[in-house]
Amino acid sequence: MLADWLGLTLDGESPATTQGRLPFGRYRIHGPGILELTPNDLHPRAHAVIVSAGIHGNETGPIELVGELLARLEAGLLRLGAPTLIILGNLPSIRAGQRFCETNLNRLFRRDLKASGNEPQRARELMAAVDAFYARHPQPRLHYDLHTAIRDSRYPRFAVDPYADTVTRAEQWRWFSAAGIQAVLHQHQHSWTFSHYSKHYHQAQAFTMELGKVHPFGANDLAALRPMRQLLEALIEGREPPGDDPDVLKYFKVEHELMRESEDFRLCFPDETPNFSEFSVGTRLSYDAKAGEFIVTEQPLAVVFPNANVELGARAALLVRTTSTPQN
Ligand SMILES: O=C(O)CCC(=O)N[C@@H](CCC(=O)O)C(=O)O
Ligand SMILES: [Zn+2]
């Protein structure tokens, strides 16, 4: 049934039933792409776990990873021990194989959202689903929003740590280390992403997890994500995830965001530049007819998520520097 849910949801069809039993619990479908799993026996260490994927429709690896988790739950290979909400984000854009249809869903997760349209409507549905889930469950809150990046990366698997007052527990860095995450990027300001929503409004331990590069369905290297799957499995079972040395991770913080402010905007480095590539002082990184040029000053800067083709007013790249320690 759970494997059917994924397939039917991606095909735009409704499952025949909206609730049922699992080997170690039960499931309930709250709406398209919103599935709650409730354990028969709650593990004492359990979090209230949210795992989301497909917030960008062309990022298929995390959707396949969720498929593996659901198949293993259904086969009884995982012993459900934590309340878990599984979310598939932008269903029309997943079907179209595009990052988004009309606007980038992952900039819309704010309670004062005014916009109308398909993606704003979906953001409202997902915010309501998160609010209701966390209201139902008193356990410590956790949300991993799974993505893949457009470019290659010096660190193919990295976590983006949203900016918010909530303190990140040090165990997260240990878990990430064991899960094969190679770097952590601390945001410097509110970003209104899905993970930021859970951290800012619900004080969840919440991260955007970049798990390799964008590929079509069937072309993803799920073997490289096996340690990450083990982290998710531990959380779904409600047990303490494996940990490893947090000093193995590289830590970065955002220093500046390059914004696209006019039609005449360009990045002054090749399109295929990998994430975390470093540029020395004096390098011109961008030109915008309205904002002018951006030149690296004082210390080298590395570039993450460069994309000159974003909407006007949107982020075209993050400029980052290393930081010696994780920020808690
Ligand atoms: O590779 C890219 O350019 C984009 C990959 C992606 O979708 N990243 C997320 C990061 C969200 C965050 O900053 O937490 C995004 O841009 O929405
Ligand atoms: Zn994404």
Image (cartoon, helix red, strand yellow):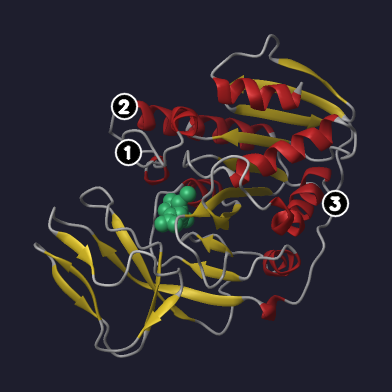
Can you give x and y, in whole percent of width and height, for residue 59 in the image?
52, 45
Can you give x and y, in whole percent of width and height, for residue 84 in the image?
71, 37
Can you give x and y, in whole percent of width and height, for residue 228 in the image?
72, 56
Badge nearest the viewer, 3 or 2: 2
The part of the image, by quadrant, that contains residue 120 is top left
| 3D distance between C-alphas at marks 1 and 3 | 38 Å
The part of the image, by quadrant, that contains residue 264 is bottom left
Dot 1 or dot 2, earlier in sequence: 1
Q: Which residue is mark 1?
A: 103
Badge nearest the viewer, 1 or 2: 1
| 3D distance between C-alphas at marks 1 and 2 | 9 Å
Out of 172 and 230, give the one closest to the viewer. 230
Residue 199 seen in render? no
Q: Which residue is mark 3?
A: 239
The answer to the question of whether label 1 and label 3 lie on touching residues, with beta carbons closer than 8 A, is no
Is the residue marked by circle 1 packed among few (<14), some (14-19), or many (20+) residues within 10 Å?
A: some
Q: Which residue is painted at 56% across and 36% down in the image?
A: 130
Can you give x and y, in whole percent of width and height, for residue 188 in the image?
40, 67
- Is 196 positioned to the left or the right of 101 in the image? right
Dot 3 or dot 2, earlier in sequence: 2
Q: Is mark 3 within 8 Å of ligand 1?
A: no
Quadrant in which the N terminus appears: top right
